[in-house]
Image (cartoon, rainbow, N blue to C red):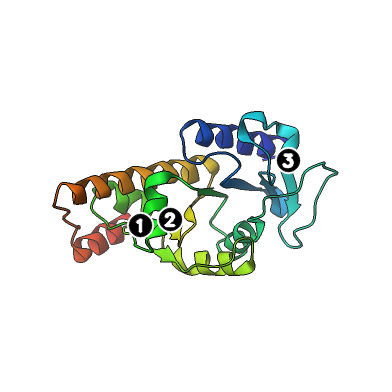
Amino acid sequence: MNPSTLKQTVLTYTQKAFAAGLFAGTSGNLSARGAGNIIAITPSGVRYETLTVDDIVLLDLDTGAHLEQTRRRESSETPLHLHIYRNRPDVGAVVHTHSPYATAFAAGGVPIPCALVEMIFYLGGQVPVAPMAYPGTDAVGIGAVEALEGRSACLLQNHGAVTVGANMQGAYIRAEYVEDAAKICLLARQNGSLVEIDPDMVTRILSQET
């Protein structure tokens, strides 16, 4: 994927995520990896309803340096994205949201339990929580990489949710599933009953998938 297409992909899905309520204001951030270790990432402090393709920032994965002149600063959570890409060669896109239901679990430091079959196929089962870390630091990325081991989604304690995929379409649909699962689990608990899927069954299904 060439740089222009990469930037357009990030813009398209950022606007889609904003319209879907997966974040508000200037919170959350998306990125995608292109050929030659080029990263396209959302800028810092720009409201999403005004975002244009020229606002998307191109970075070198290895150095984090800008690859073109731009009036924008890259997302403050760039270290999170870079750590994931450097440790997960299978990942081609990262979506970090502040979606309300998932973030409610993150605010409590509580994993989203594996109570839905689709969570096994799309998220790898339960959505674990990475420990609280100072925003914008390497520690956020280090914690997320550990929480994402063998999975495609995690929560950041008191912060939000992160999903990954081989491409932006895959990472984005997982962000939708994380929010949907969190909502359903909270509603089930309000109704007084939530039954988690047996971990042995989760393991069996995952082993069949791979």
> Which kind of residue does numbered mark 1 sit on?
Gly
Q: Nearer the viewer, mark 1 or mark 2?
A: 2
Judged left or right of residue 89, residue 55 is right
Q: Position of residue 185 (x, y in %)?
A: 26, 49
Q: Which mark is residue 124?
A: 1
Question: Counting other residues with Cα less than 10 Å from the Cα at mark 2, is it few (<14), some (14-19), or many (20 or more)?
Answer: many
Residue depicted at x 29% and y 61%: 207
Instruction: Confirm whether residue 149 shows in the render.
Output: no
Question: Counting other residues with Cα less than 10 Å from the Cα at mark 3, is it few (<14), some (14-19), or many (20 or more)?
Answer: some
> Which kind of residue does numbered mark 2 sit on?
Ala
Q: Which residue is mark 2?
A: 153
Q: Quadrant of residue 196?
A: bottom left
Q: Quadrant of residue 83?
A: bottom right
Front residue of 112 and 101:
101
Q: Which residue is mark 3?
A: 3
Q: Quadrant of residue 128?
A: bottom left
